[in-house]
Image (cartoon, rainbow, N blue to C red):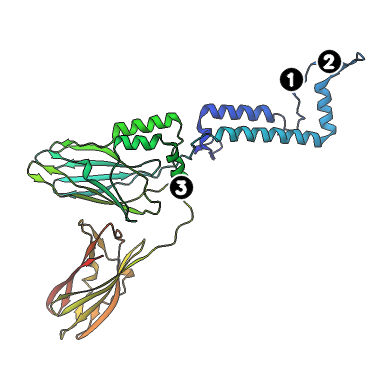
Amino acid sequence: MCESTAGGTAPFALCDPHTLWLVASTTIAAGAGESTGVPSVRQESTGIVARPGGAAVNHARMRTEADGRNPVAASRRGRRRRVAVAATALLLLAQPFVVAQPASAPPTACVAQSGPASLSIIPHVPQILFEIEITLRNAAAGVIHDDPGQITLVSDQGDQTNPLTAAQAKSMISNPSQAFWAAFGLGYTGYLLTKEHQDALMKHVHDFIWTATDIPPGGAEQGSLFFKLPNPKTGQFLLTMDGLSAESGPLPALHVICALVKDESAKGPPAPPTVRTYAAPLHATSGPLVITLTKVEFARDATSADVTVENTSDVGANLFFAKPATVLRDPYGKSYALQDLKTTLDDLVPAHASVRGTLVFAPLPRPPLIAAATLSMPNVQLGTDVLELKMEIGF
């Protein structure tokens, strides 16, 4: 889509100045005189010719006067002209392999760090390919090596894939059916696949595709990973960069969880919230306190855990200062804070009693993006003691 002079939008094919000139010229030539109410005149018939009897006849004048006397005929001619203009515009739009060009959403960076290496990624709107810009930084004293063959992408739908090679990416770009499948089979929108667009996209892949590299101390390298189109239901994905090594030996893998960027212009009605529930009858003990986890629910806007806290001591336990510090941590070290206003667990646990409630946290990535999480509730006051309730949760 492109901006029109009237402040609205115009179809993508009209963004081309040559196409715009042709359609505008056709429209002006065909519709001249209709908007002002002046009877239309065929300019090619303005010459004066003689009848067999010798009387001169001005055909243009006759047609003009006839139009005034016969508005039905004039209306039919006007409709024919408008149909011709519409047909011309449709022919211009009906090019092969055309899919609408999306309005890209602002990119969002996701970051992970492990040891001296850090990885920043920016996912792009999936089109013919799914491109992820990456920046790998080296804070070590020596060179860091990487192996693109050990990079994997896992979606929250359970799909796992590896980056495309340059040859694979170019093959997908040059395949006309890929554009059709992206637009109509998977619901994505993509580029207008003219030869020029194919060449430009292939050059982009050639110039920016990520390859094995050595990153000097304090340096950074940038590039792009290209993947086949993900499942349209994908909401988040996990990018894992393994195979990093330094002069001292192998480095830990980098794991980045990020949201898939969608094309807002192709977005339909909002989907109903989906909830995934995991039964997790787990127990953890800290002194005379026992916490039992019975269920974990992953929703789009929150992650909730149903718990029971039992107090077997002779004094009451106070969770007032513990709840604001309660967090869930994913396997990659990121913490998700408790949403205290949505939490229903009581602050006080009487002696020899138990309380039940729901702990509500900021939304965690859903399995299979994570396989475990750690629940930590510090600062629990029990008389003069301060305890921490902590448990490992597997999904």
Q: How many marks?
A: 3
Q: Which residue is mark 3?
A: 185
Residue 28 horizontal side relative to residue 356, left or right:
right
The residue drawn where x is 84% and y is 34% is 70
Q: In terms of sequence position, does the residue under pointer 2 or pointer 1 come before the other?
A: 1
Residue 7, horizontal then vertical, whole percent: 54, 39
Q: Quadrant of residue 132?
A: top left
Report x, y in % for residue 333: 20, 57
As drawn, is 51 to the left or to the right of 215?
right
Kindly report the distance in space between the C-alpha atoms of the residues bearing marks 3 and 2.
Answer: 61 Å
Which secondary structure lies at badge 3? helix
Q: Point out which mark residue 49 bears.
A: 2
**Is the Cβ of the residue at disc 3 closer than 8 Å to that at disc 1?**
no
Residues 114 and 372: in front is 372
> Label 1 neighbourhood size at 10 Å, few (<14), some (14-19), many (20+)?
few
Regarding mark 1 in the picture, which secondary structure is present there? helix
Q: Position of residue 394 (x, y in %)?
A: 23, 66
Gap in angstroms between the C-alphas marked 2 and 1? 13 Å
Marks 1 and 2: in contact by CB < 8 Å?
no
In this view, 93 is above or below 105: above
User: Where does the C terminus fall, quadrant-wise?
Assistant: bottom left
Choose between 289 and 203: the one closer to the eye: 203
Give amino acid for label 1.
Glu
Tell me the residue that label 1 is attached to: 44
